[in-house]
Image (spheres, helix red, strand yellow):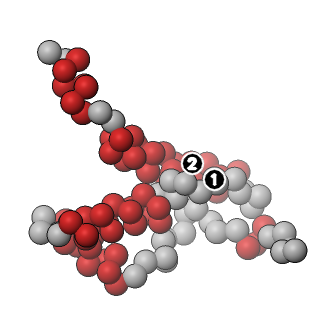
């Protein structure tokens, strides 16, 4: 059985993201320049959604209510990106006609 985490072991939402690889950096930079290939585009978007925004992570923090609030803000940005990726653009276009 794993011991429960102590408050000091929880990540702080306001700290810079340190979970990245060189391939993530080059993918994001290529995307910004507009010359990312399909794999780089997918990798960059996955890093933003999963690592930078913590979209699918718990935002609870036993350390501080402010950490939880900050994490909610990060997660909200990721949820907005995912929403636009999943929305049916054709249906919206038809509804506006």
Q: Which mark is residue 22?
A: none
Q: How many marks?
A: 2
Mark 1 surroundings: few (<14), some (14-19) or many (≥20) residues within 10 A = some
Residue pictured at 61% horizontal, 48% vertical? 69
Q: Is residue 47 left or right of residue 92?
A: right
Q: Residue furthest bottom?
A: 22
Q: Is residue 67 left or right of residue 27?
A: right
**Residue 55: x percent and y percent?**
50, 53
Residue pictured at 21% horizontal, 66% vertical? 38
**Residue 95: x percent and y percent?**
23, 17
Q: What residue would you read off at disc 2?
A: 72
User: Would you place residue 7 above or below residue 76 in this image?
Assistant: below
Looking at the figure, which quarter contains the N terminus?
A: bottom right
Residue pictured at 19% horizontal, 25% vertical? 93
* Circle 1 SS class: loop
Q: Is residue 69 left or right of residue 5?
A: left
Q: Quadrant of residue 15?
A: bottom right
**Residue 47: x percent and y percent?**
40, 66
Mark 2 surroundings: few (<14), some (14-19) or many (≥20) residues within 10 A = many
Q: Badges 2 and 1: C-beta atoms under 8 Å apart?
A: yes
User: Would you place residue 83 above or below residue 49 in this image?
Assistant: above
**Residue 76: x percent and y percent?**
48, 45
What is the CA distance from the residue labelled 2 to the residue labelled 1? 6 Å
Q: What residue would you read off at disc 1?
A: 59
* Circle 2 SS class: helix
| Sooner in the amino-acid sequence: mark 2 or mark 1 | 1
Can residue 30 be seen here? The reply is yes
Q: Is residue 62 left or right of residue 85?
A: right
């Amino acid at each position: 059985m794993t011991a429960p985490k102590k408050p000091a072991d929880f990540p702080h939402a306001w700290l810079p993201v340190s979970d990245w690889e060189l391939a993530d950096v080059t993918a994001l930079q290529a995307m910004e320049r507009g010359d990312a290939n399909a794999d780089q585009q997918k990798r960059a978007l996955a890093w933003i959604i999963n690592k930078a925004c913590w979209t699918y992570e718990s935002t609870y923090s036993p350390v501080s209510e402010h950490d939880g609030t900050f994490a909610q803000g990060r997660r909200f940005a990721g949820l907005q990106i995912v929403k636009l990726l999943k929305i049916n653009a054709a249906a919206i276009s038809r509804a506006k006609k």
